[in-house]
């Protein structure tokens, strides 16, 4: 009796390494017809992987040119690290592959941006913390507010050519220190970020359990001698800009102005 | 097994991102009782759950909104039930979580395999129809049904290859699988046309041999055709209207089975929403032309 494991092992070898690996007698029918059938499967698999990469990296594909992108994609999808990913995540290591293959920094940076954009697109829902929710708080209450990075919040510092390219569509991006990606509501938003904003967001993301009080954040970033110290006067503008961008969320119990307090 | 709700005995369509807005608009504006055959809105919608494994974002916003108006069917393309290593635990957990979130009226997957957890093939590959494979499938389907706490349907595949060591034909394999695991059949009639043409058997004989009591959903789709010296090769690409032969086979099966939830599948070169709905209306019209047959009780009796 033909065992499942035997049949599948033979098919996998043939799909990965070509018709020469297909054992005679595994399938019924004429040899040409069997090869035709195997070719349909091989083409379907290859096409699905290539289209998934094209859909994930449309701008990178344009920057590289179709032929170069296709050639790199074909090499990449033959690697074990790529084929163990589900189709939706097949592009996860593609930017690293491009970097390892000597592609220009602009191509690698754009591919990394596109992957982060996709992560933000599929990230969990969360209500962003808005500046209005903090309005009217005294200083001590403000410093006790616990914040976390919004699940969709991402940032990157790609090659300057990527800033210029994306800057054609995003105001202020051409001169920015970093690119901020957010999805505070339905749509993914791309906006410019200063170095201070990135430092602050990075510290929030690195915080224990991805949460920290604003006071602790201020102390940790501005105390003398700390790594990547932020001038104290830069802290609040950076925090306000991050709140505006929708990349932070509240973990504690800051009341929202839309809450109906009469229901209590 | 729990059946949270039922798919209506009318035509549904596969939900594509390019149609999100049109679908939501049409289902919001129409009464479900007047959907399908009478209106411009689909009676129900099918999605590939693997496209909704992200935690959030626009796909979930659209699906959540649409699910308030219409029943959903989850047609999985990724469990790889036939893989010798068994269903991947993470994949099953993701499907279970999505089922808890949306409580679809139906869940289905395929009589196929798609590689292993360390080497995934985005395709539906054939399994040998042997006792060994049957035992494996029964165990895997049972595992999935136990985890999801519901009966699932298994779709007959489109085939380009037949194993030389098969112990039985596809119908017998499916019938035994249903008997031993309690699952049902998702009968893809286009797949029957594709397999019959490629492997050289008579499609009507297969359609006539399927036990209609086991069929909980029907799929209709188009295929591509290549002509070769040794005969045509049909490729199940879901990229064109349903063929005339598939419509004929569909009508023939309905004569024995009565109305069923029927899906129009169109996954490549996706047409305008109106074109998809025209196909759905055609499927409804075929079903309306039937004599009234008490249909679904017997299907659910197998649950």
Image (cartoon, coloured by chain):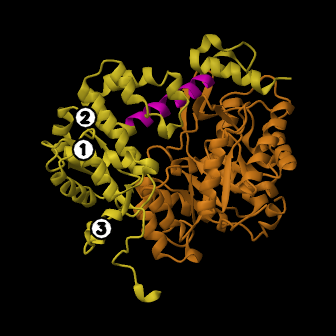
**Which residue position is annotated with label 3?**
A140
The reply to whether residue A92 is visible in this rendering is yes
Q: Position of residue B110 (x, y in %)?
A: 68, 43
Q: Find the magenta span and give its range.
A: A37-54
**Which residue position is annotated with label 1?**
A179
In the rendered view of the protein, which quadrant contains the C terminus of chain B? bottom right
Per the image, is A46 magenta? yes
Residue at mark 2: chain: A
Describe the element under mark 2 as helix, strand or loop: loop
The chain in orange: B
| A155 and B39: which is toward the camera | A155
Toward the bottom, the furthest residue is A262
Mark 1 and mark 2 in contact (Cβ < 8 Å)?
A: yes
In the rendered view of the protein, which quadrant contains the N terminus of chain B? bottom right
Report the mark closest to the observer, 1 or 3.
3
Picture residue at 30% right of the left edge, 48% below the top: A220
Number of numbered discs visible in the structure rendering: 3
Question: Label 1: how many residues lie within 10 Å, few (<14), some (14-19) or many (20+)?
Answer: many
| A249 and B192: which is toward the camera | A249
**Which residue position is annotated with label 2?**
A158
């Amino acid at each position: 009796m033909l065992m499942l494991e035997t049949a599948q092992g033979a098919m996998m070898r043939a799909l990965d390494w070509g018709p020469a690996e297909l054992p005679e007698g595994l399938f019924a029918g004429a040899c040409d017809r069997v090869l035709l059938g195997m070719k349909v499967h091989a083409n379907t698999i290859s096409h699905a992987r290539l289209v998934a990469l094209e859909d994930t990296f449309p701008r990178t594909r344009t920057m590289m040119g179709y032929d170069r992108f296709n050639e790199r994609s074909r090499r990449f999808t033959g690697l074990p690290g790529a084929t163990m990913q589900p189709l939706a995540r097949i592009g996860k290591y593609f930017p690293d592959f491009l970097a390892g293959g000597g592609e220009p920094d602009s191509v690698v940076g754009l591919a990394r941006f596109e992957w982060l954009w996709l992560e933000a697109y599929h990230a969990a829902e969360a209500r962003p913390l808005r500046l209005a929710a903090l309005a009217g708080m005294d200083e001590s209450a403000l410093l006790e507010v616990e914040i976390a990075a919004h699940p969709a919040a991402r940032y990157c510092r790609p090659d300057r050519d990527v800033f210029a390219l994306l800057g054609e569509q995003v105001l202020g991006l051409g001169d920015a220190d970093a690119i901020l990606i957010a999805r505070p509501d339905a749509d993914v938003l791309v906006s410019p970020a200063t170095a201070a904003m990135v430092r602050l967001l990075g510290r929030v993301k690195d915080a224990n359990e991805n949460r920290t009080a604003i006071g602790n954040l201020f102390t940790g970033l501005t105390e003398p001698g700390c790594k990547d110290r932020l001038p104290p006067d830069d802290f609040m503008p950076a925090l306000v800009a991050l709140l505006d961008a929708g990349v932070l969320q509240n973990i504690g119990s800051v009341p929202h102005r839309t809450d109906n307090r009469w229901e209590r | 097994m729990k059946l949270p709700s039922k798919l209506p005995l009318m035509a549904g369509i596969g939900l594509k991102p390019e149609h999100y807005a049109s679908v939501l608009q049409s289902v919001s504006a129409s009464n479900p009782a007047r959907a399908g055959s009478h209106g411009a809105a689909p009676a129900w919608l099918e999605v590939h759950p693997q496209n909704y494994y992200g935690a959030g974002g626009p796909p979930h916003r659209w699906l959540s909104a649409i699910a308030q108006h219409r029943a959903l069917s989850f047609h999985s393309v990724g469990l790889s039930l036939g893989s010798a290593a068994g269903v991947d635990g993470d994949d099953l957990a993701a499907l279970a979580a999505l089922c808890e979130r949306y409580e679809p009226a139906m869940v289905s997957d395929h009589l196929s395999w798609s590689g292993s957890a360390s080497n995934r093939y985005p395709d539906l590959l054939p399994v040998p129809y042997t006792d060994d494979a049957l035992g494996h499938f029964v165990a895997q389907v049972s595992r999935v049904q136990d985890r999801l706490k519901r009966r699932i349907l298994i779709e007959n595949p489109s085939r380009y290859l037949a194993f030389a060591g098969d112990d039985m034909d596809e119908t017998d394999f499916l019938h035994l699988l249903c008997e031993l695991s309690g699952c049902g059949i998702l009968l893809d009639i286009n797949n029957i046309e594709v397999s019959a043409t490629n492997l050289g058997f008579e499609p009507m004989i297969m359609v006539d041999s399927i036990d209609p009591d086991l069929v909980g959903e029907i799929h209709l789709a188009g295929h591509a055709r290549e002509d070769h010296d040794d005969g045509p090769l049909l490729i199940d690409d879901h990229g064109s209207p349903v063929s005339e032969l598939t419509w004929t086979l569909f009508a023939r099966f309905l004569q024995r089975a009565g109305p069923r939830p029927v899906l129009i599948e169109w996954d490549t070169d996706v047409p305008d929403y109106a074109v998809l709905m025209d196909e759905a209306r055609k499927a409804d019209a075929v079903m309306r032309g039937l004599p009234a047959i008490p249909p679904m009780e017997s299907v659910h009796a197998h649950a």
